[in-house]
Amino acid sequence: MEFSTRAIHVGQEADPSTGATITPIFQTSTYTQQGLGEHKGYEYSRTHNPTRSALEACLASLENADYGLAFASGLAAASAVLSTLRPGDHVVAGDDLYGGSYRLFEKILRPMGVQIDYVPAADVAAYGEAIRPKTRMIWAETPTNPLLNLVDIAAVAKIANERGVTLVVDNTFATPYLQRPLDLGAHVVVHSTTKYINGHSDVIGGAVLTSDHKLYDEIKFYQNAAGGVPSPFDSWLTLRGVKTLAVRMRQHCENARRVADFLAGHPRVQKVYYPGLATHPDHALAKCQMRDFGGMVSFAFEGTRADVDAFVRRLKLFALAESLGGVESLCCHPASMTHGSIPKEERERRGITDTLLRLSVGIEDADDLIADLDQALGKQTQTHAAPKKVKVEAGARG
Ligand SMILES: *Cc1c(COP(=O)(O)O)cnc(C)c1O
């Protein structure tokens, strides 16, 4: 079965008790048992829920995995994978990570005695060089956030396999429609289903997909023991969203390509980061590792932080907001939003400057999106009201 067919059918057979064509929302915490130790495979909804099972089966199929586990958020999914580590274990991670993953590594894992080293995300050899006797896991994200560098998954998987290390790939940005890390040799895929998989910016969710039976057992145990599961309704919404993943991704990619081309030709834009541009350093790798180039476009603004502020205030269609992967277009300022929990020096070292913006290009009409960017870029910077001071506790963002 091809991808779009699996997205609509796998795990979603008609309900045997009623014939309901669409998987019902099994909004129940418990299940009536027939006798002592006799039940229909469901006892308590933290452990198993049929709506969640349908989602887990569908997502596993889309990543060509034997097993799927759904979680209450992408970070709950990541935590479940990281729960397989023990004090003294070592992780090698790409350095251009989702800010929340970095926070999880630094503020939760490190104090628990897990060592983490970061390597330049796109530098394949660096992953191998950072491996030590206690290294258990490599954590990679590709394309990276927000600079859209690529990690050569097959090459890193080869190193991981030779050295007996588990390779985990956060596939949130690419989605299984564009890229399937397990097919390239990775052992575990993590998703924030909040993004493209659900696709409608109305659910927080996550998933872990793997064909490694032992890891699955450990992570499944943790899912039940720690309890970060999605509700039946959230599972249902995500299952509904994923049905249109293929068509949405095709439109996201087409629109992003148009937006990237437009930005690349605009005098107020210093640099465009999009793997679909021939000028992108990983363009050739993107062509063979991914089906298409994705819906995320980042760009550096020619000007000051105040110019960037004026630009985002003028946008009408692009909403200034965190997150990505929904049908509507969003614009994010990583330095103050998604990556606000990374210390400034560390952030700037990675190229996440105050004038970098990240677009999640939606599936509106591309002409309207370009017209919006054009009007917001076009005008000269005007003096504008001093920004409202909003006090946010350090590390509390996103
Ligand atoms: C959003 C995101 C996460 C975290 O997911 P939540 O659902 O917000 O917990 C992890 N990785 C990437 C790449 C993300 O974009």
Image (tube, rainbow, N blue to C red):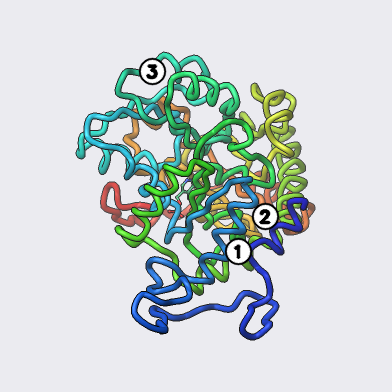
Regarding residue 188, the answer to whether it shows in the image is yes
Q: Earlier in the sequence, mark 2 or mark 1?
A: 1
The amino acid type found where label 3 is placed reads: Ala
**Left or right: where 157 falls relative to 114:** right
Mark 3 CB near ligand 1 (8 Å cut): no
What residue is drawn where x is 46% and y is 71%? 41
**Residue topped by disc 1:** 200
Q: Is residue 15 above or below residue 238?
A: below
Question: Of residues 60 and 248, which is closer to you in this image?
Answer: 60
Asked whether the residues under the numbered discs 3 and 1 touch, taking CB atoms below 8 Å apart as contact, a structural biologist would say no
- Element marked by disc 2: loop
Indicate which label's residue lies in the foreground, 2 or 1.
Answer: 1
Residue 268: percent from the left, percent from the top?
Answer: 64, 35
Q: Which mark is residue 130?
A: 3
What residue is drawn where x is 44% and y is 58%? 71
- Tell me the CA gap for discs 3 and 1: 39 Å
Question: Of residues 359 and 67, which is closer to you in this image?
Answer: 67
